[in-house]
Amino acid sequence: MITEVRLRPLRNADFDRVLELERQLFGRGAWTYGMLADELAGLGRWYIVAEPERLDRAGDQPVVGYAGLWFDGDVTQIMTIGVDPAVQRHGVGRQLMAALIERSRKVKAEAVLLEVRVDNAPAIELYRELGFEILGVRKRYYQPENVDAYTMRLDLSVAADDTADAPVDAPVDAPVDAPDDAPGDAA
């Protein structure tokens, strides 16, 4: 059992292991080598892997998780996340999600979007714990299995907007005084 992982950028040398996990996790719906290579070559992509932090071994360890996102200039879309079944429910997925959310904040995305199988209760629970809300259902999204997906969203703009205009020395939740000639709401 692993207790800690380190996250690092996904490299070409990781492809075989990531694709092995894809097949194990997603069966007939798994990405192929070509799909993964095309995805990584796309603009605005950011992919990471998790490997065990082991003090008893030197060098890279076998990848136990991977995740990636796409930033379109407004929102980030989580393209994939997978964790080796042998280490699921040990915090690897949570660490990967935290890194994706942090990256989304860093690129100043307004929100993070994802799709998740409606029958993947552990993932849905994790996403809700992280603040994601269900927007709707995409019928037969996962192919070739014909499984529906929830579309979920984490709003990142709320926290950023609440503090962006506050005076430097004012408490974060203090109201900002508007000048007397400030325009009102536009109709």
Image (spheres, rainbow, N blue to C red):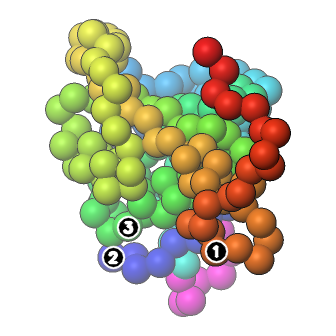
Q: Residue at x 55, y 47 (%)?
A: 158
Crowding near pointer 1: few (<14 within 10 Å), some, many (20+)?
Answer: few
Q: What is the distance, in whole Å, between disc 3 and disc 1 at their CAs?
A: 34 Å
Crowding near pointer 3: few (<14 within 10 Å), some, many (20+)?
Answer: some
Q: What is the distance, in whole Å, between disc 2 and disc 1 at their CAs?
A: 44 Å
Mark 2, mark 3: which one is toward the viewer?
A: 3
The amino acid on which the numbered mark 3 sits, given as a three-letter code, is Gly
Vertical side of 36 occupied by 108: above or below: below
Measured as percent of width and height from the top left, residue 81 is found at: 46, 43
Measured as percent of width and height from the top left, residue 19 is found at: 51, 37
The residue under label 3 is 91
- First reached walking from the N terminus: tag 2 or tag 1: 2
Q: Helix, strand, or loop for circle 1? A: loop
Q: Residue at x 55, y 78 (%)?
A: 53
Return the mark for residue 105. Answer: none
Instruction: Give the quarter of the figure containing the N terminus.
Output: bottom left
The amino acid on which the numbered mark 2 sits, given as a three-letter code, is Met
Residues drawn in magenta: 54-62
Q: Front-most of 13 and 174?
A: 174
The residue under label 2 is 1
Answer whether residue 129 is magenta in the image.
no
